Amino acid sequence: MAEVVHTPRVFSGIQPSGGLTLGNYLGALKRFVETQDTGGVETVYCIVDMHAITVWQDPDKLTHATRELTAGFIASGIDPAKSILFNQSMVPAHAQLAWIFNCVARLGWMQRMTQFKDKAGKNSERVSLGLFAYPALMAADILTYHATHVPVGEDQKQHVELTRDIAIKFNNDYGVDFFPTPEPVIEGAATRVMSLRDGSKKMSKSDPSDMSRINLTDDADTIAKKIRKAKTDPEPLPATIEGLEGRPEARNLVNIYAALAGMTVEQVIADHGGQQFGTFKPSLADLAVARLSPITTEMDRLMKDPAEIDRILAEGAERASEIAEPIVKRAYEIVGMVGRGKA
Ligand code: ATP
Ligand code: MG
């Protein structure tokens, strides 16, 4: 069968499961903006509210978090005229394709997903079925746009790989070359920002400890306090990168510095190697405040007009549907469902 060449298209999403963190900003948002601004490729960014409800969300908080996340995208530099920006639940194609993918993905594949194991913990009998099926919905998010590139943090690599497996199995099962096999794009100095309280855990917006993360809504004093209190070891920063080996908390702060400053880890070590944390942490706090406070201020301004945010999302959803609907329609035809235009 002739290989179909898919036009490059970028898709990624963030859950409105809390406020945006520095991890979301460095691992995802900042890179979404860079991709948009490089140009030459269509960029589709989604506030994945259907993923958020895989764990309980208070309805009013979900509404607020969806608008705040939209404000965070725009304040960080996503231009709704250049990128398609919308919330997942407004485009039914995601859920429609997800059902087909629930039937393509194998139970054994899903059981290997580390995010499910991490989030379910010891309580796996009592978590939602949605939490388990999450990666099939994520595959639908990506593939309903025939996206080829998915910028994500390191933690989502396994889900993008599962998406590839689902695309390949669908194509094989139905003898078509319909879905592309998308690539995860994991780049930069901070692809996995760690918790400020525990260097072995990733920073997450859903972590119960607010001290574990920097939120995009934190003010300057809060950011400085959280960095000052961040867990570290008693040694000064090493003089070489190798010296960061076995020092996850030190490595994390150096990575964050590098990503915020647009420097390499080598350059940060060249400038700050040998410093005590009592010296390095205030420099890091100043840098974080300088980079984040303009975003926070702009988010505050945007949040004063929720109707305008809702309008932007609705417009984005319309543009997203124009791409997604024909693809899902074709997928249903391929599967043999009657009534969606099959001859
Ligand atoms: P939750 O705790 O609810 O899962 P989260 O903080 O993990 O929230 P997600 O919405 O799941 O955020 O992920 C959005 C994007 O941010 C994904 O691309 C993910 O890889 C990236 N991301 C999340 N946490 C980090 C982190 N600590 N470092 C780098 N990237 C991250
Ligand atoms: Mg997550």
Image (spheres, rainbow, N blue to C red):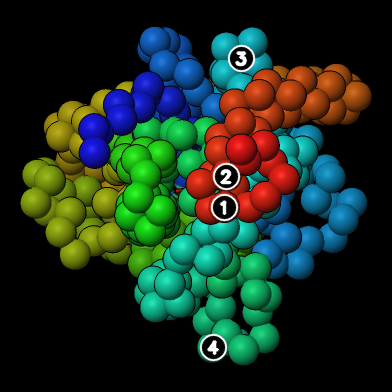
Tell me the amino acid under the disc marked 4. Lys
Query: x, y percentage for residue 230?
Result: 46, 56
Q: Nearer the viewer, mark 4 or mark 1?
A: 1
Quarter of the rendering containing residue 329:
top right
Q: Are marks 4 and 3 in contact (CB under 8 Å)?
A: no
Crowding at label 1, few (<14), some or many (≥20) Cα neighbours within 10 Å? few
**With respect to residue 315, does 38 lie above or below?**
above
Which element type, helix, strand or loop, lies under badge 1?
A: loop
Residue 169 seen by the camera: yes
**How many marks overall?**
4
Residue at 72% of width from left, 38% of height from top?
A: 91
Q: What residue is disc 2 on? A: 333
Q: Earlier in the sequence, mark 4 or mark 3?
A: 3
Q: Around disc 4, counting alpha carbons within 10 Å, would you say few (fewer than 14), some (14 to 19), or many (20 or more)?
A: few
Q: Is residue 270 left or right of residue 94?
A: left
Specify which label sits upstream in the sequence, 4 or 1: 4
Marks 2,3: beta carbons within 8 A: no
- Residue at horizontal 68 percent and vertical 64 percent from the top: 54
Write down the residue under mark 1: 336
Q: Residues within 10 Å of mark 3 (few under 14, many from 20)?
A: some
**How far apart, in angstroms, are the residues tagged by discs 3 and 1?**
39 Å
**Identity, as a three-letter code, of the amino acid under mark 2:** Glu
Q: Position of residue 320 (x, y in %)?
A: 65, 27
Q: Position of residue 134 (x, y in %)?
A: 57, 62
Kindly identify which residue carries mark 3.
79
Q: Quadrant of the C terminus?
A: top right
Residue located at (64% from left, 46% from top): 94
Query: How far across and how far down the image is residue 247, in percent?
Result: 23, 61
The CA span between labels 2 and 4 is 41 Å
